[in-house]
């Protein structure tokens, strides 16, 4: 495999136009195929986990599943409600809604306790998750009724309209993040290369890789359903790694060009870059893919989609770096060589690039402590990272439901007004029971008994009569219980515990041969968090093993493998600690424009560990490769550490700036979960690039010396193998 990047670069360099045309044909083909087959979206069944999922499956089998429902509320623009006008508006609304093919039924209007608000429940046709697509005609009819009754406020909310609002907001947020990240990335690349053409190459390849991965993800969704988050991940990771891989390759090609001083052609320079940076890109890409694949062990539709999107875009980015990038570099190199030849023919002086030290004053200052005082630097930097990680010990997890969505979404504002007037709509538990048809009456009686017991419990809406519904075949019965507290609240969670631990075992649970379960928004969230907590040790265990195995395979050193795992844990722990410190409390709400959940979104920690371990391997591979290369060229271990990190410091930091910008832009999004993910990844990459790679890693490697490469130390070349002009005698 070590020669594969060189062979691919050699072919691309010799057939540059074919490679370029082939790449863009591949991108167009991927997009066309994806658009042709379309995406297969995840269904409600794909999200089911735990007891709540089992209860929903039972209810669905009896045709008693939760239906997508909208609530249209009518209240006065000012003063008391005109009941006659409200009744007229409700009647017109009912007639309009019943004519829509998207509507299954419209219930009778319901008045609030104070009589100032009227609501009209509308049940939509189709599965629960299709509601966000089918709700658009309903919103249009609501607007027409509102226009016809200017003295009244007529507005709509419900899970379908809220989901649509979240999707619309997410689309605007992603557009905003792109407007932030693309200019900053371009400016960073301009600073690194000082050339518009060279700065444009990484962006071009990153964006084309994203386009190809989007098409491939549509095809993949027919095997692993898409819950709607895969595109976000492709954009997030694609820009980061696409620019990074191209940046590493470009910098190495320019370094080899400077060393050659005009004595080698572009084709040879590309091969030299492929032999070093190309191999590192392959190893790094494989490490990200292997690490990310551990997310499949979570057996969760969202994590599977995140894994698929990441794997596809990283694989495509690696391929682009090994195929079309060498071809582009050769064409750009030929153009440079032609311009140089013309200047020489006109008798003008020809400027030849000279190899320059990669370490500037800033990097030199950061590396100096590790060089002069490695033991002290290692202890101090490790203690700082551990201190940053300390808040993670108080981590609390929550499944972010609709109560956590931004109030900038109009449907969420209406939802708040609805639940204020009708607090019994805040939370509903669904107690599901399945038996044989001959026991239907017995099951209904037991469920009714459960309902009566909850009326004396202050955690439940005592003034709301519990209702029992039974399927047409008599096999499935469902009891709905209202709770006047928000879903994330302690009271709502306690009410679920009371049902599962006390009321259900004392009533329906006493009946033999009856299958029971409790579902609803609270149960879904609680079971989802428990499911993830149960999978976390398995995923983290395989992640650590995979990271260790990949590092040992890449560098043939057990010690380097252990160091890689330890440093990744250190940076992940520190970033998770900062996440808890900023987002679990309320002090940073105004600073980062969010509303604290009092906990961290349950998907974030696992996502952080897996993605960060993969991305950290980028820096680990590129930095350690340069150190290993220096040792092979005859340098002592201590000097090789300083040389390798010095040569890679600027490019690694530039790559980190791009990643921090991409991830940091997600902090500006409205969705709290996305804010947390973006913040955590941005902080993690920053800590990894600065503290880990410039302080902890060099200090540790300097202290270990040759022992760091046990059991196989890099084979040293004789000093004569590298002539005075700095050109290596062979490639590979």
Image (cartoon, rainbow, N blue to C red):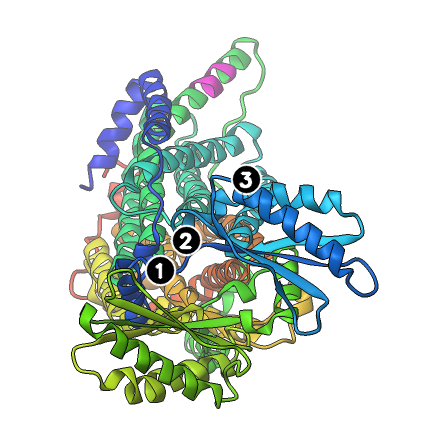
Residue underneath mark 3: 189
Residue annotated with mark 1: 65
Measuring from the top left, give residue 665's x and y in whole percent: 57, 52
Q: Is residue 121 magenta?
A: no
Q: Main secondary structure of the magenta part?
A: helix
Q: Are marks 2 and 1 in contact (CB under 8 Å)?
A: yes
Q: CA distance from mark 3 to mark 2?
A: 46 Å
Q: Please state the extent of the stretch shown in magenta in the rendering.
A: 334-339
Can residue 361 be seen here? The reply is no
Task: Give the camera-side residue of 435 and 584.
Answer: 435
Badge 2 is on which residue? 128
Instruction: Please report whichever mark, 2 or 1, sits nearer to the chain's N-terminal start.
Output: 1
Judge depth for marks 3 and 2 and give the one in front. 2
Q: Quadrant of the C terminus?
A: top left
Q: Nearer the viewer, mark 3 or mark 1?
A: 1
Callout 1: few (<14), some (14-19), or many (20+) C-alpha neighbours within 10 Å? Answer: some
Give the camera-side residue of 720 and 263.
Answer: 263
Tell me if residue 337 is in the magenta stretch: yes
Q: Tell me how far mark 3 sits from mark 1, CA to CA.
A: 53 Å
Q: Quadrant of the N terminus?
A: top left
């Amino acid at each position: 495999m070590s020669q594969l990047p060189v062979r691919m670069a050699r072919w691309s360099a010799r057939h540059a136009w074919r490679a370029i045309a082939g790449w863009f044909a591949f991108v167009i083909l991927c997009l066309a195929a994806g658009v042709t087959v379309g995406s297969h979206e995840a269904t409600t069944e794909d999200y089911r986990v735990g007891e709540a999922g089992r209860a929903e499956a039972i209810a669905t089998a009896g045709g008693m599943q939760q239906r997508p429902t909208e609530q249209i509320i009518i209240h006065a623009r000012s003063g008391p409600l005109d009941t006659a006008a409200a009744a007229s508006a409700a009647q017109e609304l009912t007639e309009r809604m019943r004519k829509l093919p998207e509507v299954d039924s419209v219930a009778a209007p319901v008045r609030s306790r104070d009589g100032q608000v009227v609501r009209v429940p509308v049940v939509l046709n189709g599965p629960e998750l299709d509601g966000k697509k089918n709700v658009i005609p309903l919103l249009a009819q609501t607007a027409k009724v509102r226009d016809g009754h200017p003295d009244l406020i007529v507005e709509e909310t419900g899970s379908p309209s809220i989901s649509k609002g979240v999707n619309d907001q997410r689309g605007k947020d992603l557009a905003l993040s792109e407007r932030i990240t693309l200019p900053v990335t371009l400016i960073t690349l301009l600073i690194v290369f000082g050339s518009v053409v060279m700065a444009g190459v990484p962006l071009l390849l990153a964006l084309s890789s994203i386009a190809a991965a989007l098409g491939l993800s549509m095809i993949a969704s027919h095997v692993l359903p898409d819950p709607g988050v895969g595109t976000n991940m492709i954009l997030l990771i694609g820009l980061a790694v696409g620019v990074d891989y191209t940046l590493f390759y470009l910098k190495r090609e320019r370094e080899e060009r400077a060393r050659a001083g005009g004595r080698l052609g572009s084709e040879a320079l590309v091969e030299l870059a492929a032999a070093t940076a190309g191999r590192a890109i392959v190893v790094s890409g494989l490490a990200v893919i292997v690490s990310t694949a551990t997310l499949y062990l979570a057996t969760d539709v969202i994590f599977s989609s995140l894994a698929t999107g990441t794997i596809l875009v990283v694989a495509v980015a690696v391929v682009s770096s090994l195929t079309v990038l060498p071809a582009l570099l050769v064409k750009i190199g030929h153009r440079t060589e032609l311009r140089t030849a013309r200047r020489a023919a006109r008798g003008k002086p020809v400027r030849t690039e000279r190899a320059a030290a990669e370490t500037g004053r800033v990097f030199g200052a950061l590396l100096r402590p590790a060089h002069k005082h490695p033991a002290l630097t290692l202890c101090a930097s490790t203690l700082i990272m551990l201190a940053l990680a300390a808040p993670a010990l108080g981590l609390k997890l929550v499944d972010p439901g609709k109560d956590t969505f931004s109030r900038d979404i109009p449907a969420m504002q209406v939802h708040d007004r609805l639940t204020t007037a009708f607090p019994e709509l805040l939370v509903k538990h669904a107690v599901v029971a399945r038996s044989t048809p001959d026991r239907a009456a017995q099951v209904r009686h037991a469920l009714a008994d459960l309902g009566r017991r909850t009326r004396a419990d202050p955690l439940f809406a005592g003034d709301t009569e519990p209702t029992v519904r039974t399927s047409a075949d008599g096999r499935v019965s469902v009891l709905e219980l209202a709770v006047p507290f928000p879903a994330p609240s302690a009271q709502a969670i306690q009410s679920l515990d009371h049902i599962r631990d006390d009321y259900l075992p004392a009533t329906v649970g006493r009946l033999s041969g009856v299958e029971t379960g409790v579902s609803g928004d609270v149960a879904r969230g609680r079971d989802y968090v428990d499911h993830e907590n149960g999978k976390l040790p398995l995923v983290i265990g395989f992640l650590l093993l995979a990271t260790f195995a990949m590092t040992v395979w890449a560098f043939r050193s057990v010690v380097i493998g252990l160091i890689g795992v330890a440093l990744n844990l250190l940076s992940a722990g520190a970033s998770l600690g900062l996440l808890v410190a900023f987002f679990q409390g309320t002090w940073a709400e105004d600073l980062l424009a969010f509303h604290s959940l009092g906990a961290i979104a349950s998907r974030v920690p696992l996502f952080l560990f897996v993605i960060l371990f993969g991305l950290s391997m980028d820096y680990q591979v590129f930095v350690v490769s340069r150190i290993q290369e220096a040792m092979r060229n005859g340098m002592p271990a201590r000097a090789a550490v300083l040389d390798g990190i010095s040569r890679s410091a600027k490019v690694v930091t530039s790559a980190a700036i791009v990643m921090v910008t991409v991830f940091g832009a997600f902090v500006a999004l409205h969705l709290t979960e996305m804010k947390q993910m973006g913040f955590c990844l941005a902080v993690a990459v920053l800590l990894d690039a600065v503290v880990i790679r410039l302080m902890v890693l060099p200090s540790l490697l300097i202290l270990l010396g040759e022992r760091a490469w046990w059991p196989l130390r890099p084979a040293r070349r004789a000093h004569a193998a590298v002539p005075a002009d700095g050109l290596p005698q062979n490639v590979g």
